[in-house]
Amino acid sequence: MSDLFRQTRFPIILFLCFSLAFPPELLGQIETREYDSNGLLTKITRFGRRRIDIEVWKNGKCLGGIETKTGSSRYTPEQHLRDAWLQRLKNYIVTVVRDG
């Protein structure tokens, strides 16, 4: 996990994700820690729409999005491509979090 912390610009998102449960519990825990969050929104990319499960904000600044995965659900190549586009062109980081 330490390599992952060094690679991201927003380590607080990783801290929140690895220390918490899943929506709606995740949303509640984020807000308990005085962060703002929005659930289920859509970002437009060159490669199509990207649905974000949770977006995290602090002091009016967007820190990035969280993609929640449960069970054996896949992080698809299309999601990865759209997330890479969002990061490179919009400076928007999407962090994938699994429940188990």
Image (spheres, rainbow, N blue to C red):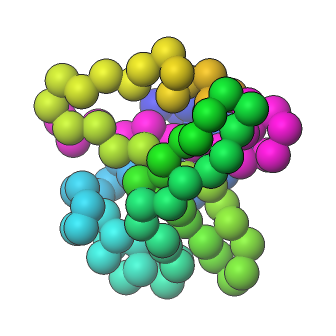
Image side of residue 91 versus residue 13, left or right: right
Q: Nearer the viewer, residue 96 or 19?
A: 96
Q: Position of residue 20 (x, y in %)?
A: 29, 58
Image side of residue 77 versus residue 93, left or right: left
What are the residue bounds of the magenta stretch? 85-100
- Residue placed farthest to the top in the image? 77
Q: Is residue 3 visible?
A: no
Q: Residue at x 22, y 67 (%)?
A: 25
Residue 93 within the magenta-colored segment of the rendering: yes
Q: Nearer the viewer, residue 46 or 39?
A: 46
Q: 35 above or below 91? A: below
Q: Nearer the viewer, residue 89 or 47?
A: 47
Q: Position of residue 41 (x, y in %)?
A: 50, 60
Q: Residue at x 24, y 27 (%)?
A: 73
On-image quarter of the C terminus: top left
Image side of residue 84 versus residue 32, left or right: right
- Residue placed farthest to the right in the image? 89
Q: Residue at x 71, y 81 (%)?
A: 60
Q: Total label count? A: 0
Q: Position of residue 68 (x, y in %)?
A: 34, 44
Residue 92 within the magenta-colored segment of the rendering: yes
Q: 75 above or below 56? A: above
Q: Is residue 10 visible?
A: yes
Q: Residue at x 41, y 54 (%)?
A: 53
Q: Position of residue 49 (x, y in %)?
A: 58, 41
Quarter residue 76 falls in: top left
